[in-house]
Amino acid sequence: GIEVVPHAVEEAGLERSVLKTYVNGGCYFDGAQEREVLARYTGDPGGKADGRPMVVAGSLGFGRWVLTGAHLEYEPALLTRTVHHDRLRPELLETDRDRRSFMAFLLARALGGDR
């Protein structure tokens, strides 16, 4: 279901090491190599994703890739006004500045930053 799920961020140099992100079911990436993992689920309400990779990145040939199991692109202030979103919005706003910085970090990495 749609929830706010905390996740630990690695390597991004953010103020917080744990962000809160909008997740709708969310997938995780079992089998990812440790060097590819940029964020892990923590405090998953269902418990099945705790500690598992949520954001992974790498390169293949001359290309780069980033995969995420959560909706890092969702702006809390722009979510539709529904009872459910209104309940989630305050929690998402707590770490929104770092969410934006993490997105910028991921885009920079995908567009030519560190491999």
Image (cartoon, rainbow, N blue to C red):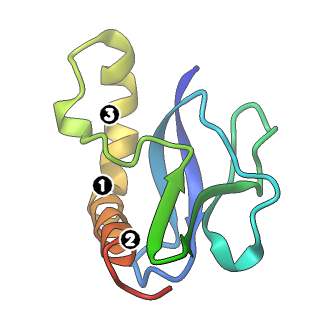
Q: Secondary structure at mark 2?
A: helix
Q: Residue at x 39, y 68 (%)?
A: 106
Q: Residue at x 40, y 41 (%)?
A: 91
For residue 114, above or below residue 19:
below
Q: Residue at x 44, y 88 (%)?
A: 114
For marks 1 and 3, give the CA distance.
Answer: 10 Å
Q: Nearer the viewer, residue 76 or 65?
A: 65
Q: Secondary structure at mark 1?
A: helix
**Which mark identifies residue 110?**
2
For marks 2 and 3, give the CA distance.
Answer: 28 Å
Give the position of the N terminus as an image quadrant.
top right
The single residue placed furthest to the left in the displayed view is 78
Q: Considering only order in the chain, which callout, 1 or 2, is on the residue closer to the N terminus? A: 1
Which amino acid type is marked by label 2? Ala
Q: Position of residue 8 (x, y in %)?
A: 60, 65
Q: Position of residue 73 (x, y in %)?
A: 32, 46
